[in-house]
């Protein structure tokens, strides 16, 4: 898989634990790459400023062009031990969610367009000021 990166150059620094946030992003990128295997494809990662419910945030999006998330799985994505992978342990997204929540943020997952088959997108929303 190849990675296309787009970041708003005017983003201010955010207060995060770099090791833990790296773990979140590596997990999301790994999931995206695995979703597109074996054919491969392009993963898009972007970071931009956003205002969510009146709060200044940085939104980091990881999007793939894999098969997407089965509709029946959308509500269970962040539950411990839930997995759609044959060899998965079901902890990656649960751990990622806990890390993001500890940083005062939120993580959401969805299909790029309604329905399966269009790829998945995960967005990490982190406050600019904690």
Image (cartoon, rainbow, N blue to C red):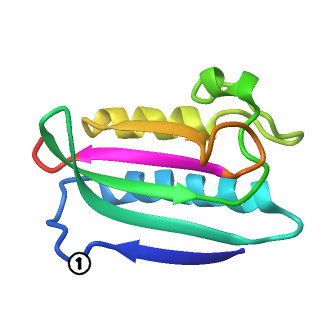
| Residue at 70% in and 33% down | 90
Q: Which residues are magenta?
A: 120-126
In the rendered view of the protein, which quadrant contains the N terminus?
bottom right
Q: Is residue 121 magenta?
A: yes
In the rendered view of the protein, which quadrant contains the C terminus?
top left
| Residue at 29% in and 62% down | 48
| Residue at 33% in and 44% down | 125
**Where's residue 107, x and y in %?**
43, 38
Q: Is residue 92 above or below residue 101?
A: below
Is residue 7 rendered to the left or right of residue 69?
left
Q: Is residue 82 visible?
A: no
Is residue 75 rendered to the left or right of residue 51?
right
Q: Is residue 108 above or below residue 122?
A: above
Q: Under tag 1, what secondary structure? A: loop
**Where's residue 121, x and y in %?**
56, 49
Q: Is residue 45 visible?
A: yes
* 10 Å crowding of disc 1: few (<14), some (14-19), many (20+): few
How many numbered marks are there? 1
- Magenta stretch, main secondary structure, is strand
Is residue 117 rendered to the left or right of residue 96?
right
**Where's residue 101, x and y in %?**
34, 32
| Residue at 34% in and 73% down | 7
> Which residue is tagged 1?
9
Is residue 123 rendered to the left or right of residue 116?
left
């Amino acid at each position: 898989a190849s990675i296309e990166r787009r970041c708003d150059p005017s983003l201010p620094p955010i207060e995060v634990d770099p090791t833990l946030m790296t773990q979140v992003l590596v997990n999301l990128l790994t999931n995206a790459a695995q979703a597109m295997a074996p054919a491969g494809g392009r993963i898009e990662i972007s970071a931009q400023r956003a205002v969510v419910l009146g709060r200044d945030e940085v939104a980091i999006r990881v999007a793939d062009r894999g098969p997407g998330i089965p509709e029946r799985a959308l509500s269970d994505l962040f539950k411990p031990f839930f997995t759609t992978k044959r060899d998965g342990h079901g902890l990656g997204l649960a751990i990622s969610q806990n890390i993001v929540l500890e940083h005062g943020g939120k993580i959401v997952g969805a299909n790029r367009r309604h329905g399966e088959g269009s790829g998945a997108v995960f967005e990490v929303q982190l406050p600019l000021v904690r």
